[in-house]
Image (cartoon, rainbow, N blue to C red):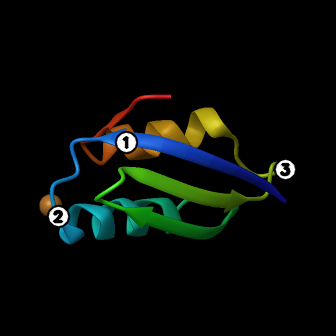
Amino acid sequence: MAKIELKIAGMTCGGCAKSITSALQNCAGVEQVKVDHVSGIAQIVFDSAQTNAQELKTVVEDAGFDVLN
Ligand SMILES: [Cu+2]
C-alpha cells in the first residue's frame, strides 16, 4: 500500500473537502482518504497496482481544485 500527501488549493469549507473525499473514494485502488480544508492537505492511502499519484492528482483537478505538489 502506498501513501501520498497532496497539497490542494481552492478549498474553502468542509463541503469542498467532502466532494474531494468522495471523488477520491470513487477512484479504483483508493483505500483511505483524509482531507482537511483548513490545511489544504489530502492524505491518501492507495494500492499502487491499481492507481498512482498522477491519476489521483487528476481526480482532484477534475473535481475543480488545484494540486500544488
Ligand atoms: Cu467549500
Q: Name the residue under label 2.
A: 13
Using the numbered discs, state the Cα–Cα distance from disc 3 to disc 2 in whole angstroms.
32 Å
Type of amino acid at the residue the image marks with label 1 = Ile
Disc 3 under 8 Å from ligand 1? The reply is no
Q: Residue at x 70, y 41 (%)?
A: 52
The quarter in which the N terminus is drawn is: bottom right
Q: In which quarter of the image is residue 37?
A: bottom left
Residue 17 is situated, as x and y percent measured from the top left of the image, at: 31, 64
Q: Mark 1 points at which residue?
A: 8
The answer to which of marks 1 and 3 sits earlier in the sequence is 1
Q: Which residue is drawn at 84% across and 50% down?
A: 49
Disc 1 under 8 Å from ligand 1? The reply is no
Type of amino acid at the residue the image marks with label 2 = Cys
Q: In this view, does 12 lie above or below 17?
A: above
Residue most toward the front? 39
Tell me if label 1 and label 3 are in contact, CB under 8 Å: no
Give the class, few, some or many, for how many residues have Cα within 10 Å of label 2's Cα (few <14, many ≥20).
few
Q: Quadrant of residue 27?
A: bottom right
Residue 4 is situated, as x and y percent measured from the top left of the image, at: 66, 47
The one nearer the camera, 58 or 66, is 66
As drawn, the label of residue 49 is 3
Q: In this view, does 47 lie above or below 59?
A: below
The answer to which of marks 2 and 1 sits earlier in the sequence is 1
The one nearer the camera, 43 or 64, is 43
Type of amino acid at the residue the image marks with label 3 = Ala
